[in-house]
Structure formats: C-alpha cells, structure tokens
Amino acid sequence: MAADGKIYLSNEDGEMLVVAAGPDFKQIATNSIGELLMATPALSRDVMYVRSLRTLTAIGAKP
C-alpha cells in the first residue's frame, strides 16, 4: 500500500516495513505486529487496517 509518500509492506514474519517512495531504497521504520500477516493493509480516513491470522488492528490517530 502507498500513502503520503511512503510504501507499506508486510511480511509473513509479522513485520510492517515502511519505506520512502522513490527510486532509491530508504527504510523509514519496521513495526512488529506480532502475528503472521497474509493480507495487504488497507487505508480509510487516516486509519490503517492490518489483518493478521487472528486479529484486525486499526492504526491511526485517536479522534
């Protein structure tokens, strides 16, 4: 998923990688979700939804 100049990648180890969009690889962050990730994250109204094997996590600012 791409948003706000960043690309969000997930892997089967339960990590969400954030890289800068551009011609050169620049990793911004690695975040551990702690479970197997098998789906592409989704973005809606400034909230990112990440589905793991057993849970759905919403990541975003509180209203």
Image: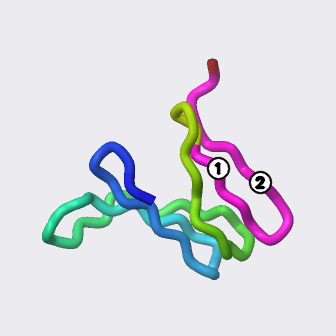
Q: State the residue at coordinates (33%, 62%).
A: 19
Q: Quadrant of the C terminus?
A: top right
Residue 59 in the magenta stretch? The answer is: yes
Checking the image for residue 56, the label placed there is 2
Mark 1 in CB contact with mark 2 (< 8 angstroms): yes
- 38 left or right of 45 in image: right
Q: Amino acid at mark 1?
A: Tyr
Q: How far across and down, in percent of the image, does residue 46 sit?
A: 52, 34
Dot 2 falls on a residue whose secondary structure is: strand
The colour scheme applied to this rendered structure is: rainbow
Q: Position of residue 62 (x, y in %)?
A: 63, 24
Find the distance from the CA under tag 1 to the CA under tag 2. Answer: 7 Å
Considering every residue shown, the one lying at the far left of the view is 23
**Magenta-colored segment: predominant secondary structure:** strand
Give the side of residue 6 with respect to residue 30, left or right: left
* Residue 52 sits in quarter: bottom right
Relative placement, left or right, of 50 versus 22 is right
- Mark 1, Cα crowd under 10 Å, few <14 / some 14-19 / many 20+, is some
SS type, badge 1: strand
Picture residue at 33% right of the left edge, 58% below the top: 28
Local packing at callout 2 (Cα closer than 10 Å; few below 14, some 14-19, many 20+) is: few
Q: Which residues are magenta?
A: 48-62
Identified by mark 2, the residue type is: Leu
Write down the residue under mark 1: 49
Instruction: Residue lying at the far bottom in this picture: please name it.
Output: 12
Question: In the rendered structure, which disc, 1 or 2, sits on the residue that comes first in sequence?
Answer: 1
